[in-house]
Amino acid sequence: MNSIWNSNYSAFRNRFPQLAELLPCDSIPVIPAGWQVSEAKNGQFTITENGIRLHSSYNPQREAAGAVATSEVNSKSTTVFYGFGLGYHLVEWAKIHKDKKLIIIEPDVNIFLYSMSILDWTEIFSINQLVLAVGCPAESVLPLIESSDKVNIGETGVSDAFYFDIPAFTRHAQNYFDVVKTLVKRNQRKNEINAATLKKFGKLWCRNSIKNLQEMVRLNGIKTLKEKTDSELPFMIVGAGPSLEKILPYLKELKERCVIVCVETALKAMLRIGVEPDFIILTDPQFWAYRHIAGLSAHDSILITEISTYPAVFRFPCKQILLCGSQFPIGQYFEQQLSLDLGDLGTGGSVASSAWNFACYCGAKKIYTAGLDFAFPKNQTHIKGSSAEQTFHTISNKLAASDKFTANALYSANAVMGKDYNGTPVLTDSRMKMFSWWFESRLTACKDVQTYTFTPEGLNTPGIHPTSLSDFLKNAPSMSVLKKQFFENLNNATENKKISNETNSLFNKLMTQFPTQDFEEKYSFLKPYL
């Protein structure tokens, strides 16, 4: 046993020196609580935990070998183990899947260390793509599973992984594994939605991106704003939910105390009361997203968008337009070829998530929200007078009244009842809950950023805390000095940008050759849309 432990721990320390420093162990670890070690019929070690067997009592190695050698495991590029007992399944997997990615999740450090004193793990530590999520918080596990490749929509890590979920291996930390599995399932659902979106709108964002490519070398990126704000300067996200109505009269005062970031659906409501937001976020490629700002102007606002949006967006009358990095292959390809780092806002399924990401990207430590309801308070879909509501009236007729479109919006996505921040039932649906779940997981991962809501009528989202608007207005000081400095830094950064002749030449060359051979090879799935 000593020789097995020494060999395993030495291999572990050599492979993961930094992790080994966090998990020092000078002697053989003690047996985990509730474990009993015994001998199987074939002479190998087996384990029972509080009377429940973790491995076969006859031949644990053969049992494990049969479990990992299946077509389902072979078809995936990654295998994730929720717990592992002594590690028989891990060892057998490592023997036949050396070219795949292996992720081992175990919150109990002692189980990980003790198992290395019983079973030979050197085969496991020889895997090139080995990830050890040992002793990690549950919320930190998902990024280890997710792929860093943004291009293959719907093909990211959680969707291209086989999960070994053996109840006996997770029973000792059931709540922990339940959280991890919930986060994984949510992201799998998100990827399914992204894949469906690609199928439905692929041709649209390809066409928009190609028309707007010139904007990449004309406009600045949000990279100029990365962590440029003073941490004392709060940001405020304004959505177009029904609860925004009660906040509108106070937006002038709030603008003195916060940087206002408005989603495009709420712009009309803000302009109606004579308040222009500091920033407007529009990242949806659909024509209907552009309709929310069509015919409007905001000469004191900065528009944040990306090249896949409807081309008319770039003619919106505003103070300045800044680009964020594209979430779609054509934009990503040109950014890579031109060595452009515009600044990535990531994905979250809604423009509200892009707005929150933008505030966080700028360096805000306190983010307030209003109108981000993720629900339908009083059975309303949007604030009264919003462009969305007016669209319902515009397209209505004698046979299809505006109420029909409202009802369709309310009940077309598996409507269910949720709870608001006061504990009162509120109508929501699966789509809104998905957006809420994104915020929950994102906020959990960004513990240094505090997020509050002035409108508790929306769906209760863990991580967003209700706060009193009156108390905020009474106690929060004016931020005019900090806001002035923030926008002076922005102006200085954007005025100094000059596109090099080399970049312009390379861009023109790419345009004449597009699509290039390497583009077609890497993004062959786009051929139907080009």
Image (cartoon, helix red, strand yellow):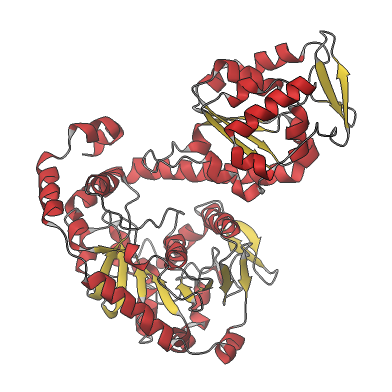
Write the residue at 37% across / 82% down: 485
Q: Is residue 495 left or right of residue 258?
A: left
Above or below: residue 26 compared with residue 275: above
Which quarter of the rendered picture does the C terminus lie within?
top left
Above or below: residue 354 compared with residue 54: below
List x then y, in percent, for residue 493: 28, 71
Which quarter of the rendered picture does the N terminus lie within?
top right
Q: Is residue 31 left or right of residue 161?
A: right
List x then y, in percent, for residue 25: 75, 38
Q: Is residue 103 visible?
A: no
Write the residue at 38% across / 45% down: 197
List x then y, in percent, for residue 253: 46, 89
Above or below: residue 451 compared with residue 86: below
Query: 342 and 295: which one is in front?
Result: 342
Above or below: residue 389 compared with residue 86: below
Query: 377 and 328: which one is in front?
Result: 328
Residue extending farthest to the top is: 42
Write the residue at 51% across / 78% down: 232
Classify residue 393 by image quadrant.
bottom left
Q: Is residue 110 left or right of residue 225?
A: right
List x then y, in percent, for residue 68: 62, 19
Query: 344 and 91: which one is in front?
Result: 91
How many tags in the picture?
Answer: 0
Residue extending farthest to the bottom is: 474
